[in-house]
Amino acid sequence: MRGQRHVPWFNPRQMNDATVLALSTGRSALLAELLQTIEQRSTHPGQISHWLITGPRGAGKSYFLRLLQVTLKQEPLPKVQLVLLPEELPNIFAPHELLAEISRLLAPSAQHAGTPSRWRVDNTGQLWDEALAQLLSRIQAPLLVVGIENFDALIAQAFSSDVDNSRLRHLMSNEPRLMFVATAVQGDFDEQHNQRLFRQFDHRSLPHWTPIDHRHYLDKRAKQQGSTATTQQLNRIDAYSRYTGGNARAGAVLAATILDVNDPLNGADDLDAAIEKMSDHYRALIARIPDNTKKLFDALVRGGEPASQTELAERTGARQSDISRAFAWLVDNGYVNESREPGQKTKHYRVLDRLLVQFYRMRYLHPGQRSRLAVMADLLADTLNFADKGQFVSRNATQAVVWHELDITLAQAPGHETEVISQLGDAVADAAMHDSPANAFALGLDILQGLAARPHLPAEAALRGLWIDMIEMAVPWGVMRDLLGEWPQLWPEAEHNQVHQLKEVLLAWLTKLEAVQTGDTSYQDPNDPDLVTTLTALEQALSPKTRHRLGLLQPAASERT
């Protein structure tokens, strides 16, 4: 029974076959397409094709090959053999050694450990021909499917010359009994028109896990452990699903953590435990970033997200043209994703895996500190605004998780109330950008209701900070006005005179900002000099970038060019 329950995070080869099938999530469509291609290859030898499956580390590439292996074992295709090479191939430094390794694994009963790589390789053509003849003699079916992981690393390690690449291309193009199903972080080695392996593969990307995939995995994992996922546990995975960036490994770790942590509301403990389990993986992810690119990754996390390439160049004392190639590595390898602010052309970037961000903060920015405040501020901004929460989770259940965590955070970090609450404006902006103004309003109302239910919190300062943040993040004017219209019901004027006064100030400010941004020449400043002074002070709280965007400041000459 333990073998079925054991789920190794980083080596699906150690996973029980039944567990592989039971926990398979979000891969059925891609697997069905691959099986159909394999069957067509086995019955139509002239239709030669090979697959390359790409995705960032942790996306589930190793798991997918293991799933293919188990599926063909459970429901074998009569004309197909499959051999799955080890995840790493430290003994393969020459082309013929790859063929020899495939041959060895086709005869596992021999219990042969394989041949060490030769110190020096001569007569490469002869060795290749001999190894190929041995391999073909061992194939017992019309088609042999070979699963090869990290194919980009294998090419660099064992097929470094054009001659070697030409031999591999000739094999892939002309041998109907052989089909490679390879994986790589990215497939650019197959996309260079001047390279020998140009377009030898049909490319497929592993899809990111959706919120529904996270939910399905949690439910399957609970059943595998002999239990049933509770409504509260499902609510938690719904709330945190965006936190993983769709990374299957991070989602699996987080789901297991939710099943292990008893307190149904303690989300910070969920995240802390998940980060702890992922630490080795995240250290490896950071270590593989090239040095110059690592400077940009650090600047992105350390200086705040999202950020444009221009901002990252400024943070690192460079020009945008200097960093463009180094930054592209982060995009190509799935570390960051891009977005655009409403009405803006500039692309802004953000680390996709939010658990990785928290690991980086807790290990390198605030070492030795648990940093619950940073964890919760990001959690609140990231998880409050997922679009489908109404499909699975009632608003009250979602608020219970988020505001329970906020109470814990503020109790442990007094004096930071305004800082944390104001960051929730990011979530409202994200909802407006990716969902709709109606969803942004609903989310903003959730935040206001939670704040109003806690009279011990400094409502006036928190609300001022929240509105400033929403203006910084370009929340639509109408959404902010509609939310201000809800204040009288939440903070009656007779009992909250200062909040009411702040509401009138913010309404006047929104009117001015919208008029300035749209170029409305009919707008005139209020007659009240105190109000004008207050509005000026509020504007000084905005960043120079936002004041430029709104037309409150003229850009510097360097920015105009």
Image: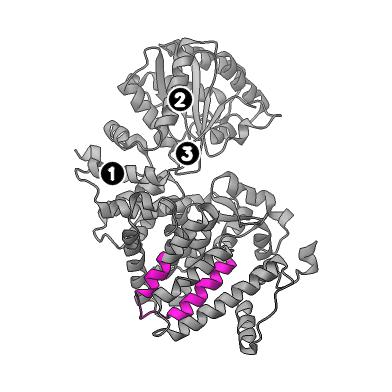
- Percent x, y for residue 391? 36, 49
Left or right of residue 278: residue 533: right
Of residues 200 and 433, the one nearer the viewer is 433
- Percent x, y for residue 355? 44, 56
- The crowd level at tag 1 (other Cα within 10 Å; few <14, some 14-19, many 20+) is many
Q: Main secondary structure of the magenta part?
A: helix
Of labels 2 and 1, the one closer to you = 1
- Kindly identify which numbered label has been placed on residue 34: 2
Q: Callout 1, which amino acid?
A: Asp
- The crowd level at tag 3 (other Cα within 10 Å; few <14, some 14-19, many 20+) is some
Image-quadrant location for residue 504: bottom right
Does 95 appear above or below 233? above
Look at the image and tell me in which quarter the C terminus lies. bottom right
Range of magenta residues: 446-472
- Say whether residue 453 is magenta: yes
Q: Are the residues tagged 1 and 3 within 8 Å (C-beta)?
A: no
Of residues 534 and 335, the one nearer the viewer is 534
Looking at the rendered structure, the secondary structure element under dot 2 is helix
- Percent x, y for residue 239? 37, 55
The colouring scheme, among rainbow, by chain, secondary structure or one colour, is: one colour
Q: Which residue is mark 3?
A: 207
Q: Are the residues tagged 2 and 1 within 8 Å (C-beta)?
A: no
Of residues 198 and 374, the one nearer the viewer is 374
Q: CA distance from mark 1 to mark 3?
A: 20 Å
- Kindly identify which numbered label has been placed on residue 219: 1
Q: Are the residues tagged 3 and 2 within 8 Å (C-beta)?
A: no
Does 480 appear above or below 145? below
Left or right of residue 509: residue 225: left
- Say whether residue 339 is magenta: no
Q: Callout 3, which amino acid?
A: Pro
Q: CA distance from mark 3 to mark 2?
A: 14 Å
- Kindly identify which numbered label has been placed on residue 287: none
